[in-house]
């Protein structure tokens, strides 16, 4: 009898071992065996000092070569450690509060004819504010919400005397328009470029692929969708 081939098992196994090694330094153990593999997915068991603490689901998307992590953990402390460890493995670390550099996670949505925006601003891991809403001009759909999320973030920084911020985004145009890599082809993107050029806020840009297990990115994604559906 021919053994069924599990899609992307090698990629999942390597990433799981990488996560396992990193968590062992935090006194957290994960285990798995061949029965836990499915196509594009591996299920991992989390233990600390021999006590079961929950389950991790590690996914791989070969078309984008990205991993995502879903958690069902009974301990908020362990959940936080796993989240931090996963972010470090994937280059998602955030500045600590002592740096004075704020972090914004921004997103836009277009649902049932409604365009929305959202931004969640942090200092360290502490949420400073949530900005969200809808915009009247829907001709640019989600694109309009994406750019609006950055504009509202910078307006908040100006009002609250924030001098430095890193803007984390998943839509590439947010940075590419701001830095001149992409040229404006409509009034909306031109207004956005002019706004960025005239701000006194020091901005760092960081692209985070959507749905890769970054909880802050997922959180702002849900906030943008909520703003659209509950308007």
Image: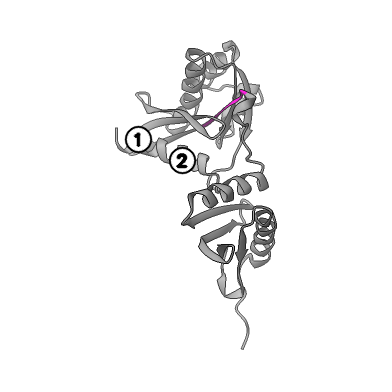
Q: Residue at x 41, y 37 (%)?
A: 223
Res. 84 in view: yes
Looking at the picture, does residue 58 appear above or below residue 196? below
| Residue furthest to the bottom | 1
**Can you name the residue that lies furthest to the front here?**
49
**Residue 7 point in image, percent of width and height:** 61, 67
Residue 43 is at least partly visible in this image: no
Looking at the image, is mark 2 or mark 1 earlier in the sequence? 2
Residue located 51% across and 24% down the image: 150
Closer to the camera, 184 or 13? 13
Q: Residues within 10 Å of mark 2 (few under 14, many from 20)?
A: some
Q: Secondary structure at mark 1?
A: helix
Q: Which mark is residue 150?
A: none
Quadrant that contains the N terminus: bottom right
Residue 20 position in % (x across, y down)? 66, 59
Answer few, some or many: residues within 10 Å of disc 1's Cα (few below 14, many 20 plus, some between 14 and 19): many
Label 2 vs label 1, nearer the camera: 2
Give yes or no for residue 73 being in the magenta stretch: no
Q: Quadrant of residue 109?
A: top left
- Magenta segment's dominant SS is strand
Q: Is residue 37 above or below residue 73?
A: below
Q: Nearer the viewer, residue 1 or 32?
A: 32
Quadrant in which the C terminus appears: top left
Q: How many marks?
A: 2
- In the image, which disc is placed on residue 219? 2
Residue for badge 1: 228
Secondary structure found at label 2: helix
77 w.r.t. 224: above or below: below
Range covered by the magenta-colored residues: 100-105
Q: How far across and how far down the image is residue 202, in percent?
A: 63, 18
């Amino acid at each position: 009898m021919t053994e069924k081939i599990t899609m992307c098992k090698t990629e999942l196994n390597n990433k799981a071992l990488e996560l396992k090694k990193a968590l062992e330094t935090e006194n957290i153990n994960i285990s798995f065996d061949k029965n836990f593999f499915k196509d594009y997915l591996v299920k991992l068991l989390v233990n600390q000092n021999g006590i079961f603490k929950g389950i991790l689901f590690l996914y791989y998307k070969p078309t984008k070569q990205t991993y995502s992590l879903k958690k069902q953990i009974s301990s908020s402390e362990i959940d936080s450690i796993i989240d931090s460890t996963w972010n470090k493995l994937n280059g998602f670390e955030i500045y600590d509060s002592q740096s004075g550099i704020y972090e914004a996670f921004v997103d836009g949505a277009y649902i049932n004819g409604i365009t929305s925006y959202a931004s969640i601003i942090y200092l360290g891991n502490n949420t400073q504010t949530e900005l969200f809403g809808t915009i009247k001009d829907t001709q640019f759909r989600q694109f309009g919400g994406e750019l609006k999320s950055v504009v509202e973030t910078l307006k908040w920084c100006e009002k609250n005397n924030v001098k430095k911020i890193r803007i984390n985004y998943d839509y590439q145009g947010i940075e590419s328009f701001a830095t001149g890599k992409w040229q404006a082809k409509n009034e909306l993107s031109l207004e956005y470029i002019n706004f960025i050029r005239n701000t006194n806020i020091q901005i760092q840009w960081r692209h985070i692929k959507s749905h890769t297990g970054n909880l802050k990115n997922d959180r702002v994604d849900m906030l943008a969708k909520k703003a659209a559906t509950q308007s």
